[in-house]
C-alpha cells in the first residue's frame, strides 16, 4: 500500500501545498520547454478569489483502492507531483497529492466510478501544455494523466482514419503517419508534449487550421468515460452518421468538464507531395492584409498556412532562442506555406505570387524554403514565440478572434495604454483564421497590470463581435469572462448539460463554466 502523506488528512486548506517551491525545470517537454525564467509560482487559491468546493479529501483507504486498480501507477511522491501541479506558463499552481496513471479505458472507468461514489474531484491531464490553467488542479483535485494511454489502435490507409488512445503525443502520431504517407490534420508548437486527447478536449486550432479546419470536422468519433464511470463509446470511423444527436461534439472543447476522453478516431490527410514555405517581411499591417488577399487569390487551393508576427516577437525569438531573422528587419513578418501535389505547379504559382508582392511593395524581403530543414527553421521562428515570451517574463495571454482588418489595432492600443509598465506588448498568430495572440510581458505578475488589461481587452473584443477565446479555451483563467462571447441563455444551457452529465461536479471543477456570483 502507498504510504499516506500526513498533510493530506490534516485540513482542507493549505494541504501541505508546495508553495513557492523552486521548480527545477519540471516542465521541460520533449518538444519545447517552458521558461528558463524560473520565477516562483504562487498557489492559485492565494492569487485568485476561489473557494474549495465540498469534495471529499483523499484518504489512505482511497489510495489503497487506487493502488489495487493501478498497481504501481499511483504517484504520491511530492517531487513527482510538482510538475503536474503547475501549468506550462507557470501561472497556476494547485496542491494535488495524488497522480493516477491509467493505461486502459476500463481503468479510467473504475477510477471515476470510485471517485464519483466518494465525491472526490478529478482533473484530467494530457501533456499539460494548456494556456488557460485548465490542466492543473486548483486545490487538491486528483490528477488523472493520460500519459500511459499511448497506443495506436488502428490506421486505415484508404480512408485515412486513425484510431488511437487519448494519451498519444501529437508528434508521435505525426511520425507514425508519415511512414504511411499521411499527416495529422492539426499541428501546434506544443506537438512534442501535447496529447491528442488534450487537443480534442481543448478543440485546439493551431497551424493547419486554415487547410484542414476544426477538430469538430476531423474527429469522426471518440470514446469518453463519464463522471460516474459509464463508458460512452462513440468511436465510429464513419464520415457520415446522422443517427440522433452527435454526442462526440459535446466533448470536443469541453476541457475535461464532461468526461475523460480515452480514445479518438480522427481523419488524417494524405501527406502533400510538395510543400513550400516563404518567410516575408512587410512594411506595415495593411501590407500584411494585402499580402493575405493576394495569397488567397493567387495561391488558391495550395495555400495551407498564413501566420504573422510583429517585430517585437522577432526580437524576443532572436534574443532568447538565438534564432536569426532570415530576412531584412521589418515591422511585420508573414509565414506562408503551400501544400500541393505538384512541385512544379506549386512553385510556379508561388513564384508569381512573390513577384507580385515584391513588385507592389507589399513585401520588402523574403526567404523561401522547400528543403525540410530550412522549412523547419522558418517555422521555428513562428512556433517558438510562446517559448521566447515565457523566457522574457510573466506573460498575460489573450487569444482572440477578430475581424481580420482590426486584428492589430488592439496591440497598438495596449502599447499606448500600458506604456513602460510592460516589458513587451506583442501580436502574432493565425491571421488566416482571424486569430490574434495578444501577449503582454512583465517582470512578474501584478494586479495593477491585470487591472489595466481586464476587462479592457474583453470589452474591446466584444465590441468588435470577436471571441475572447479563439482556440485555447477558458480553463480557470477565463471562465468568468465567458459572458463576453456567449449569451446568458447559452451559458445556462451549458450549466444544465454539466449538471446532467456530472451531477456532483467532480470533473475538472472550477474550470470553463463561470463561478456562481
Ligand atoms: P492539457 O494541457 O493537459 O489539458 C488541457 C485541457 O484539456 C484541460 O482542461 C484538461 O483537463 C483537459 N484534458 C486533457 N486531456 C483530456 C482528456 N483525455 N479528456 C478530457 N479532458 C482532457 N493551442 C492551440 O489551440 N493552438 C496552438 O497553436 C497552440 N500552440 C501552442 C504552443 C505551445 C508552445 C504551447 C505550450 C501551447 C500551445 N497551445 C496551442 C495550447 C495547448 O498546447 C493546446 O491547448 C493543447 O491542445 C493541449 O493539449 P494537452 O495534452 O497538453 O492538454
Ligand atoms: C501559438 O499559436 O503559438 C499558440 O497558440 C500559443 C500561444 O498563443 O502563444
Ligand atoms: Zn495559436
Image: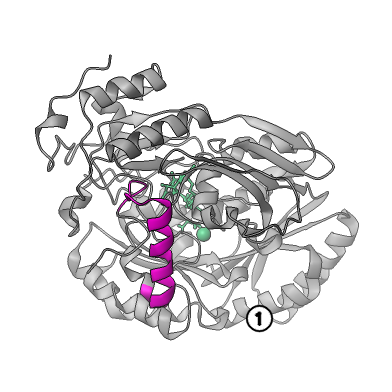
Q: Residue at x 80, y 66 (%)?
A: 301
Magenta segment includes 496: yes
| Residue 281 appears in the picture as rendered | yes
- In which quarter of the view is residue 50 placed? bottom left
Pointer 1 residue: 290
As displayed, is residue 285 above or below residue 4? Answer: below
**Front-most of residues 240 and 168:** 240
Q: Residue at x 13, y 41 (%)?
A: 12
Query: Which quadrant is the N terminus positioned in?
Result: top left
The residue range painted magenta reads 483-509
Q: Residue furthest bottom?
A: 463
Residue 350 x, y percent position in the rendering: 80, 65
Query: Which quadrant is the C terminus positioned in?
Result: bottom left
Image-based side of 144 in relation to 243, left or right: left
Few, some or many residues within 10 Å of mark 1 (<14, 14–19, 20+) = some
- In which quarter of the view is residue 284 placed? bottom right
Q: Residue furthest top?
A: 1
| Residue 26 appears in the picture as rendered | no
As displayed, is residue 472 above or below residue 225? Answer: below
**Front-most of residues 397 and 477:** 477
Residue 248 x, y percent position in the rendering: 59, 53
Residue 294 x, y percent position in the rendering: 73, 77
Q: Please, what secondary structure does the residue beneath circle 1 have?
A: helix
Q: Residue at x 31, y 79 (%)?
A: 456
Amino acid at each position: 500500500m502507498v504510504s499516506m502523506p500526513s498533510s493530506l488528512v490534516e485540513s482542507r486548506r493549505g494541504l501541505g501545498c508546495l508553495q513557492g517551491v523552486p521548480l527545477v525545470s519540471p516542465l521541460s517537454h520533449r518538444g519545447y520547454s517552458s521558461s528558463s525564467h524560473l520565477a516562483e509560482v504562487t498557489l492559485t487559491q492565494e492569487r485568485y478569489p476561489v473557494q474549495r468546493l465540498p469534495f471529499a479529501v483523499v484518504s489512505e483507504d482511497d489510495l489503497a483502492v487506487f493502488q489495487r486498480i493501478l498497481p504501481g501507477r499511483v504517484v504520491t511522491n511530492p517531487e513527482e507531483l510538482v510538475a503536474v501541479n503547475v501549468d506550462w506558463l507557470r501561472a497556476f499552481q494547485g496542491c494535488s497529492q495524488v497522480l493516477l496513471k491509467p493505461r486502459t479505458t476500463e481503468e479510467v472507468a473504475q477510477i471515476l466510478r470510485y471517485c464519483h461514489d466518494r465525491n472526490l474531484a478529478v482533473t484530467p491531464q494530457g501533456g499539460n501544455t494548456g494556456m488557460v490553467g485548465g490542466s492543473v488542479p486548483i486545490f487538491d483535485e486528483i490528477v488523472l494523466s493520460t500519459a500511459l494511454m499511448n497506443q495506436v489502435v488502428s490506421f486505415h490507409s484508404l480512408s485515412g482514419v486513425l484510431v488511437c488512445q487519448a494519451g498519444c503525443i501529437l508528434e508521435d502520431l505525426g511520425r507514425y503517419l508519415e511512414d504511411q504517407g499521411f499527416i495529422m490534420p492539426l499541428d501546434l508548437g506544443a506537438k512534442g508534449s501535447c496529447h491528442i486527447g488534450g487537443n480534442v478536449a481543448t478543440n485546439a486550432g493551431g497551424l493547419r487550421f486554415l487547410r484542414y479546419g476544426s477538430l469538430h470536422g476531423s474527429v469522426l468519433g471518440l470514446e469518453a468515460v463519464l463522471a460516474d464511470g459509464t463508458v460512452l463509446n462513440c468511436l465510429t470511423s464513419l464520415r457520415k452518421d446522422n443517427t440522433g444527436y452527435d454526442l462526440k461534439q459535446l466533448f470536443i472543447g469541453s476541457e475535461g468538464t464532461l468526461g475523460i476522453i480515452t480514445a479518438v478516431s480522427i481523419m488524417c490527410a494524405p501527406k502533400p507531395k510538395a510543400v513550400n514555405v516563404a518567410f516575408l517581411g512587410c512594411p506595415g499591417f495593411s501590407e500584411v492584409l494585402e499580402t493575405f488577399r493576394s495569397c488567397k487569390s493567387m495561391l488558391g487551393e495550395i495555400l495551407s498556412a498564413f501566420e504573422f508576427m510583429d517585430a517585437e516577437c522577432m526580437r524576443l525569438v532572436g534574443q532568447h532562442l538565438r534564432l536569426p531573422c532570415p530576412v531584412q528587419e521589418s515591422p511585420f513578418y508573414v509565414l506562408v506555406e503551400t501544400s500541393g501535389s505538384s512541385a512544379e505547379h506549386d512553385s510556379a504559382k508561388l513564384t508569381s505570387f512573390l513577384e507580385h508582392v515584391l513588385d507592389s511593395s507589399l513585401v520588402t524581403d523574403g526567404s523561401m524554403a522547400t528543403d525540410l530543414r530550412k522549412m523547419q527553421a522558418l517555422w521555428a521562428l513562428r512556433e517558438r514565440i510562446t517559448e521566447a515570451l515565457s523566457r522574457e517574463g510573466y506573460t498575460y495571454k489573450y487569444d482572440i478572434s477578430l475581424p481580420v482588418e482590426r486584428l492589430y489595432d488592439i496591440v497598438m492600443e495596449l502599447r499606448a495604454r500600458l506604456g513602460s509598465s510592460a516589458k513587451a506588448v506583442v501580436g502574432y498568430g493565425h491571421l488566416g483564421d482571424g486569430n490574434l495572440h495578444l501577449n503582454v510581458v512583465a517582470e512578474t505578475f501584478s494586479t495593477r497590470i491585470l487591472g489595466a488589461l481586464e476587462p479592457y481587452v474583453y470589452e474591446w473584443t466584444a465590441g468588435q463581435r470577436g471571441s475572447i477565446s479563439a482556440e485555447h479555451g477558458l480553463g480557470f483563467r477565463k471562465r468568468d469572462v465567458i459572458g463576453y462571447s456567449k449569451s446568458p441563455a447559452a451559458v445556462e444551457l451549458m450549466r444544465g448539460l454539466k449538471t446532467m452529465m456530472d451531477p456532483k461536479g467532480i470533473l475538472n471543477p472550477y474550470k470553463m463554466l463561470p463561478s456562481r456570483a
